[in-house]
Image (tube, coloured by chain):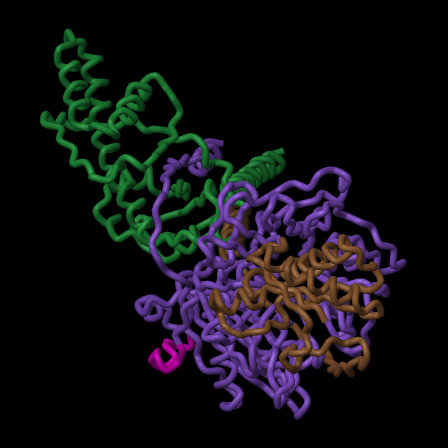
Amino acid sequence: MKKILYLFFVFLNLNAELVLEITESSDNPYRIAIHDFDGQTLISNEISSIIKADLQRTGEFSVLSSNELLAEETYQGELNYKNYRLLGVDYILKGMINSKDEMNITVSYDIYDSVKEKKIRSSKIYGIPNKTRQLAHYVSDGIYEEITGLKGVSSTKMLYVSEGLVGSAKVYKLMLADADGMNEQTLLKSNSAIISPSWSPDSKEIAYVSFETGLAKVFIQNIATGSREVAVKNKYQISSPAFSPDGKFLSLTLYQDGNAEIYILNLENKNLTRLTNHYSIDTESSWSPDGKKILFTSGRSGSPQLYEIDLLKFNTKPKRLTFDGSYNAKASYLPSNEGIVFVQRNEGEFKIALKYFNENFSRPLTESRLDESPSISPNGNVIIYAIKEDKVGLLAGVTLSGAKFRLPSSSGEVREPSWSGYLR
Amino acid sequence: MYIQSNNRNIFYVSFLMFAVSCSTTNNTEESVYNSTVSSVEVSVAEDSIVSYDEKPITTSAVVYFDFDKFTLSTKSIQTLKSVVRAMNDNTDMVITVSGHADERGTREYNLALGQRRGDAVKDYLLLNGINNNRVTVKSFGEEYPLVTGSNDESWSKNRRAEIN
Amino acid sequence: MQINTNYTIASIFSFLIHASLILFLVGYFYSEKKVRPVLNNPIDVSLIFEQDAKISPMKKTIKKPITQENYSEKKIVSSKIPTTKTNQSKEFEQAVNVIPDIRRLISEEKNLSNNEQINDADKFSLMIIDTIEGAWLKPKNIQDGLVCDLRIQINKNGRIINVSLLRSSGNIRFDNSAIKAVNRVETFNFFSKMDAKIYQSNFKNIMLTFNPS
């Protein structure tokens, strides 16, 4: 019995718990070393460079590629973790590309943690040969998720409008591209303006405003089939479409009452419910992630400001959300419902701003003069928006962690980006 | 017996500790999302378009506005007075008022602003005896500027309502 | 009969081992600290503690059960942080002026020796805070008032062998930044200068609170 009691007290070796508080910080992203993928060299290079670009665009990674590293740092078959740590590397990526036959490519990759000195993830992705970019994006997302715990958005898509000239005539296109601006495809081509593209929650349909009939009308189009229909058939102007998070409703701005008012269209039975009733402009409606509130821009206080309506009590007065700046418009909610991102005019310049609900000030996120149309990524970490530089419209991105990037533009002016939901 | 059970316990204990200290690797498998995309080309409806491919030299009148405003200035009212006269002289004249905005600010808000500007013109005309059926208002927001350029001069020329 | 007794003892033995192992792993025992009585050290008459300049923003709690002996000790620690030297010499003077009661003197001696150990502990705590602050990137554009707690286990060489998130701030990016800071530090090199006793009683497991405000 004595022995038992003795051992019992050994386990009761009570340790001190010191509590320390950290208040200041300095600067460092996750550092990952990406080795060239084994397998086919051509694709391998492309995949490595896409992964590197994807991770850098998140603003949270800095990437060392093979030519910056010595050979694979292995010792007796195991990675030489100590050497990687000396190089300041936190994680290591190794992968392989396999194509069994012409129709199938498999990418497998492993992620190693140099501090814990072990493999933390091993993944396989099955793809098809002409979609190697997508394979690479899936790898980037896997890496991002494993290390940060957040879902990655490299494999998502975006919509935007491009305007160009064919001869002397203007051509407008509604484009679909990958999150890195590549792989562009035309969804709609028109001689009249297209504005306000937006995604359905399942990312299979889009809604937009087209001037093809001579006035602004909202169309809903299926991406795969191309079939489209007018959202509401009447002789008045309609604009500013936004799908509800459950996909059953579309909020719209109707002009039939003599001024812009917000309505909600039931997509099943086509009933319209009026939401705003004020002689000033009410437009740019946007749904909260839980579908219970709608954010919109209203001129009722004398200048465009942001207001919110609770859909469960929509007969009550909308609540005003912005008080600083002479112009606050085109707002959308962060996916976490912690705040909003919108366009704000300050001292004559238009910038993209972020405001948390529990704070009473806005934070400017961008720096140029004519920024507009912000769209938030589904993980809430990146915002793309349109800028105007040297008379040319371009798409730019900013991450909440402060990184900035530009998206390549292939044709003419691009604007009005809209970020899809998750596709994986 | 006592010693044997001791050994067994130690074995269990050490096995448990070993098992717990080795955390697992995250293994995943997935297939790439495959989807088709169709492209649509819009064929223009011939009759109902107000064409903006050329400069609108056929415009009968243009009135201008201040930034973010849709109030008529005295100069605008002068212009509109002559429109009223023209319409009274020619009683089967029908006009379209199109409202526009400069490029600053958001497109949807500018679309609504263009509408307000067009309505301001229509309201004046109606107040001065013109029949509702003779005036149609459309808005094009910032989509069809008269002048390209990102400066005050260009912008002021684009904040307009055109009467055709 | 004898056989039965043996089985009983063995099964009790086995149960205790497994139960305490599981509880140990679950962290049940991380609560009170049992202060072991300090061995007798001679009093150092000139107690000069070298204060690190950057003290004020730090908040530190050392959790101990409040027993009779330790109560005065704890008081000394908390009041010491802003102005060290004067308080200590004051305490010392008070001790000297008191009519010698041998038991009292011995307990004072013990307290002051404990203080010395705690002074060192403070020093190391500050170094730990410094190192981690140097490695911590607070994510941009997050709300004010976020706080998260991590628990880390350190071996006697200063290597951080385990990190776990005790209390989330509610924001993944903030939590990740704290974990990243600890992972980046990896080893506290100064632990080699640390007394084994101090390590055992203070620094084997510590809780870090990341509070930028």
**Residue lying furthest bottom:** A102
Is residue C122 at least partly visible in the picture? yes
Q: Residue at x 36, y 77 (%)?
A: A73
Closer to the camera in the image, A5 or B137? B137
Closer to the camera in the image, A29 or A343? A343
Q: Residue at x 53, y 62 (%)?
A: A382
Which chain is in brown here? B
Q: Residue at x 65, y 45 (%)?
A: A300
Left or right of A53 on screen, residue C33:
left
Residue A178, image x, y percentages? 60, 75
Image height check: is C98 above or below B21?
above
Q: Residue at x 57, y 65 (%)?
A: B102
Image height check: is C3 above or below C192?
above
**Residue lying furthest right:** A269
Residue A328, image x, y percentages? 56, 52
Please identify which colour was used for chain C in the image: green
**Residue lying furthest left:** C46
Closer to the camera in the image, A176 or B66? B66
Please identify which colour was used for chain A in the image: purple
Residue A228, image x, y percentages? 81, 74
Closer to the camera in the image, A179 or A418? A418
Q: Which residues are magenta?
A: A65-78
Give the total of numbered labels: 0
Residue C1, image x, y percentages? 63, 33
Is residue C194 on the magenta stretch? no
Residue A18 image-quadrant placement? top left
